[in-house]
Amino acid sequence: EVQLLESGGDLVQPGGSLRLSCAASGFTFSSYVMNWVRQAPGKGLELVSAIDDSDGKTYYTDSVKGRFTISRDNSENTLYLQMNSLRAEDTAVYYCAKVLRGTSWYDALDVWGQGTTVTVSS
Amino acid sequence: DIVVTQSPDSLAVSLGERATINCKSSQSVLYNSNKKNYLAWYQQKPGQPPKLLIYWASTRESGVPDRFSGSGSGTDFTLTISSLQAEDVAVYYCQQYYSTPLTFGGGTKVEIK
């Protein structure tokens, strides 16, 4: 069974840091572009960051550039999101999601984790 | 960035009746070389992650009931639930994947009348 399992969410003060992890199983992780999508309380979906399957090419939404870093360990089938200088507006459920076809950035997201909650508050 | 706009924000439909959700992109998401529309639909139930229903605007994901259908091309798209069931109560999102950043519509909440 294809699965994604996020962890690392927590309550953190403004300016703090967190590292989210997403453990993948049931598919060839190294062959897929992977994404982090967030959902603020009562709001819609926003693509935060994405990473290529092999060459490390990355994408960040403007509001997190310079603060968040996406990475992956294909040997451990794990996706990461290092979040620094956190702000109240980063409060959200963070989902990892894989693309449908594999190596294309331009693709639907067919498998999602259950999400991990990040709350930024003093 | 391509802006994706959904309408209505919410709708209430009787059990067994048709539900129709609209999605409009600010520019065409039809890729001329392969004639595919880079548009997906997702269903999100409370407390759950989104679930992919339809991709390429009209291709149902495996296991999705055939009462769900997608149509449209270019900039205007529709998700239709032909006969609403109680388990279809959810928020539905469309998403374009024609260009980065991939963007989602604001969502449409479907309830039972």
Image (spheres, coloured by chain):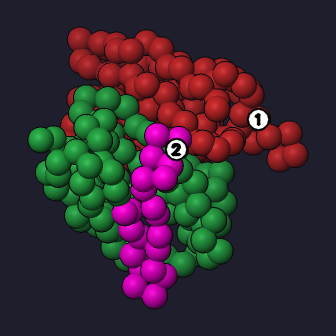
Write the start and end of the magenta stretch as one range.
A62-82
Disc 1, SS: strand
Let me know if residue A63 is in the magenta part. Answer: yes
Amino acid at circle 1? Leu
Disc 2, SS: loop
Q: How many marks?
A: 2
Numbered circle sitting on residue B30: 1
The extreme right residue here reads B33
Label 2: few (<14), some (14–19) or many (≥20) C-alpha neighbours in 10 Å:
some
Comparing A95 with A91, the one in front is A91
B106 to the left or right of B109: right
B34 to the left or right of B75: right
Marks 1, 2: nearer the viewer: 2
Let me know if residue A8 is in the magenta part. Answer: no
Quadrant showing the N terminus of chain A: bottom left
* Residue B81 pos. (x, y %): 43, 26
Residue at 26% across / 49% down in the picture? A15
* Residue A69 pos. (x, y %): 45, 61
Chain letter of the residue beneath label 2 in the structure image: A
Q: Which chain is green?
A: A
Question: Residue tagged by mark 2?
Answer: A61
Comparing B16 with A98, the one in front is A98
Work out how far the residue at label 1 is from the one at label 2, CA to CA, in angstroms. Answer: 23 Å
B56 to the left or right of A73: right
Q: Is residue A10 visible?
A: yes
Amino acid at circle 2? Thr
Name above or below for residue A111 compared with residue B81. Answer: below
Quadrant showing the C terminus of chain A: top left
Chain B colour as displayed: red
Residue at 50% across / 34% down in the picture? B104
Comparing B79 with A78, the one in front is A78
Place residue A40 in its image quadrant.
top left
